């Protein structure tokens, strides 16, 4: 990398909620998350109507997937529910234990974390709030509001992603709507596989 071209400028479009440049972007629809929501009947009911809603999308700026580099991204998580459970990201552990930073930009949601032993913790992520995920903790975000929940994230580029554990075992806690309000409760299907 020559000195003249060492700096990178990344622009956030806060009207369209886009990030440019982005080297990787992904749209995740409900059909890709069948095993992640607790209420599989509710999933099938939505899909059988010929609907496959976008749950979230994200953009990532990756300079190099090498030690020392940071990957910076923007996630747009749509509002909605599957049964009682709010729209959420799949969630993952990083293969290499390393921290991750979250910064709330718009809307409101929950940042849920879980250790490999199954302990959990969570916080509300709002515009202006920073969430620090410690190394080794799996993490997922949940949109508990009525608007798009948008946040910035940054993690070590060589961290790698493990989605398998969450897909098979789930998180110990889930976030549902009860009497019109979000509630963090035990996941009845946790560890079921
Ligand atoms: O890097 C993160 O932890 C997040 O920004 C996510 O990658 C992003 O929100 C999408 O979630 P997931 O990777 O669990 O599908
Ligand atoms: Ni992560």
Image: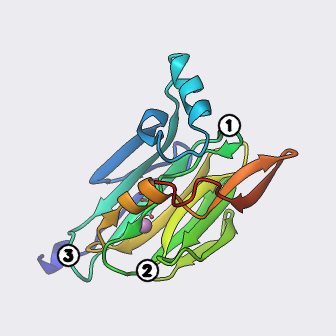
| Disc on the earlier residue, 1 or 3 | 3
The answer to whether the residue bearing label 3 lies less than 8 angstroms from the nearest atom of ligand 1 is: no
**Residue beneath the point at 20% across and 75% down:** 66
The label on residue 66 is 3
SS class of the residue under badge 1? loop
Task: Residue at the far front: name it.
Answer: 192
Label 3 Cα crowd, 10 Å radius (few <14 / some 14-19 / many 20+): few
Q: Is residue 109 left or right of residue 29?
A: right
Residue at point 21% right, 69% down?
65
How far across and how far down the image is residue 109, in percent?
A: 67, 57
Determine which quarter of the picture holds residue 125. bottom right
Task: Report whether residue 74 is seen.
Answer: yes
Kindly identify which residue carries mark 1: 83
The quadrant holding residue 121 is bottom right
Nearer to the camera, 118 or 142:
118
List x then y, in percent, for residue 82.
63, 37
The x and y percentages for residue 177 are: 77, 47
Ligand 2: give its quadrant: bottom left
* CA gap, disc 2 and disc 3: 19 Å
> Mark 2 highlights which residue?
136
Q: Quick check: 99 above or below 138? A: below
Disc 1 or disc 3, which is closer to the eye? 1
**Mark 2 or mark 1, which has the lower sequence index?**
1
Is residue 163 visible in the rendered image? The answer is no
Q: Residues within 10 Å of mark 2 (few under 14, many from 20)?
A: some
Residue at image point 41% right, 60% down: 73
Front residue of 183/132: it is 183
């Amino acid at each position: 990398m020559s000195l003249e071209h060492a700096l990178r400028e990344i622009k956030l479009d806060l009207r369209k909620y886009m990030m440019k440049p982005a080297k990787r972007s992904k749209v995740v629809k409900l059909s890709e998350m069948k095993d992640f929501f607790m209420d599989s009947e509710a999933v099938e009911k939505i899909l059988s109507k010929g609907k496959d809603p976008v749950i979230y999308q994200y953009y990532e700026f990756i300079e190099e997937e090498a030690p020392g580099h940071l990957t910076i991204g923007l996630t747009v998580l749509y509002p909605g529910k599957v049964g009682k459970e709010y729209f959420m990201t799949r969630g993952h552990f990083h293969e290499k234990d390393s921290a991750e930073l979250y910064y709330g930009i718009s809307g409101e949601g929950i940042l849920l974390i879980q250790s490999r032993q199954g302990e959990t913790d969570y916080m509300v992520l709002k515009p202006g709030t920073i969430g620090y995920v410690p190394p080794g903790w799996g993490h997922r975000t949940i949109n508990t509001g009525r608007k798009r929940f948008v946040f910035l994230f940054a993690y070590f580029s060589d961290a790698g992603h493990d989605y398998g554990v969450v897909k098979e075992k789930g998180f110990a806690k889930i976030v549902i709507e009860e009497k019109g309000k979000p509630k963090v409760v035990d996941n009845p299907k946790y560890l079921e596989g």
